[in-house]
Image (cartoon, rainbow, N blue to C red):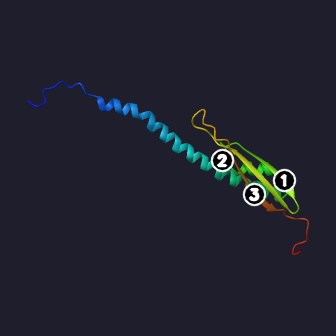
Amino acid sequence: MPYDRPRRDRGQVALEYLGFIPVLVLVALAGVQVGLIAYAGQQAGTAARAGARSASLQESAQDGCARAVSDWLSVSCGESYGGDEVTVTATVEIPSLVPGWDFGPARKTATMPLDHTDEEPGQP
């Protein structure tokens, strides 16, 4: 019989697969982390625009920023006025899936003209 040799390699593929699982998990976590980075950047842009709009209406920029982002993200906004416009910078902390992976925050800035509500309608 051609297959009379001992079967010492039984289960070898299973062991190789088990050794490769950590690599697969790391690649999957890295993919999800890249998605979180992109999402945090998008949310920072949304928060900056919403905060700038709120500040242009003489409302709280921080409240506008906080209402614009997902509840599970941490956001802070800073505003500065110059002439007839307001600039708001939103900072969103990028969540990390793996301890030790720190990507810092995502920052976006938006500028909007101030809304002069004390003028008569039709007046420039």
Q: CA distance from mark 1 to mark 2?
A: 24 Å
Q: Which residue is mark 2?
A: 70
Q: Name the side, left or right, on which 9 lies relative to 112.
A: left
Work out whether residue 63 or residue 80 is closer to the camera in this orientation and state it.
80
Mark 1 or 2: in front is 1
The residue under label 2 is which amino acid type? Answer: Ser
Work out whether residue 72 or residue 92 is closer to the camera in this orientation and state it.
92
Position of the N terminus, as image quadrant, is: top left
Residue 60 appears in the rendering: no
Residue 113 appears in the rendering: yes
Q: Which residue is mark 1?
A: 80
Of mark 1 and mark 3, the one earlier in the sequence is 1
Q: Name the side, left or right, on which 116 lies relative to 24.
A: right
Q: Quadrant of residue 45?
A: bottom right
Q: Which residue is mark 3?
A: 110
The residue under label 3 is which amino acid type? Answer: Ala
Mark 3 or 2: in front is 3
Q: Position of residue 119 (x, y in %)?
A: 91, 69
Q: Name the side, left or right, on which 17 lies relative to 23.
A: left
| Above or below for 112 versus 16 | below
Q: Secondary structure at mark 2?
A: loop
Q: Secondary structure at mark 1?
A: strand
